[in-house]
Image: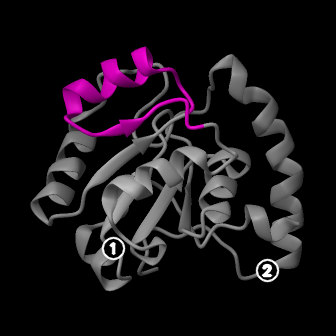
Amino acid sequence: MLNRFKPTWMVDAIYNITPEQFQKQGIHAVFTDLDNTLLAWNNPDGTQQLKDWIAAMQAAGIPIVVVSNNNHRRVGQVVENLDLPYVARAMKPLSLGIEHAKEKMNLSRHEIVMVGDQLITDVHAGNLAGLRTILVRPLIDTDAWNTKLNRFLEKFLFFGLRKKYPALHWQEDLND
């Protein structure tokens, strides 16, 4: 059962991953969670670092698709400024939203990575869809009210994962 929650990589921040690192792994598209992965949940405008990372990915021809459990209004308002496609109400930890985004991309599951800050939703859904997954540290230490239960449960999952997979560790980037 723990395999469902095991990320392929654990990286400090999504911004540390370069287009070259993705390309070296054969990744041609990035599906990403929104809150506390791309931007802080309480900062819908994002940062210059985020905008620079998106620009680098787009320049390399690596599309980014936001796959979020938030509603259309919330996700749409945020990604409108970032000019990114998105799937709202993705229903993670199920893979429905990811499958919907995958169909639009016309890529195989081996060419897509799912990035997120939660084992229970993002990593589980990505694994269920057969994608490689990247767990990133949350951008800020606080969470929206609806995420606090997941964070509590993840402490137990993390303990089990670290026990079963001792080599699983946080990395600076994919080359680490």
Residue annotated with mark 2 = 166
Circle 2: residue type: Pro
Name the secondary structure under disc 2.
loop
**Is 97 or 61 nearer to us in this picture?**
97
Left or right of 124? Residue 152 is: right
The residue shown at (85%, 66%) is: 2
The residue shown at (24%, 69%) is: 19
Quick one: label 2, few (<14), some, or many (20+) residues within 10 Å? few
Q: Give above or below for 127 relative to 69.
A: below
Q: Specify start and end residues of the magenta stretch as a single range.
A: 69-90
The answer to whether marks 1 and 2 mark residues whose Cβ atoms lie closer than 8 Å is no
Residue annotated with mark 1 = 22
**Quadrant housing residue 20:** bottom left
Q: Is 85 colored magenta in this rendering?
A: yes
**Is 163 or 83 nearer to us in this picture?**
83
Residue 91, percent across and down? 63, 37
Q: Give above or below for 90 relative to 46.
A: below
The residue shown at (70%, 46%) is: 93
Circle 1: residue type: Phe
Name the secondary structure under disc 1.
helix
Separation of marks 1 and 2 at Cα, in angstroms: 24 Å
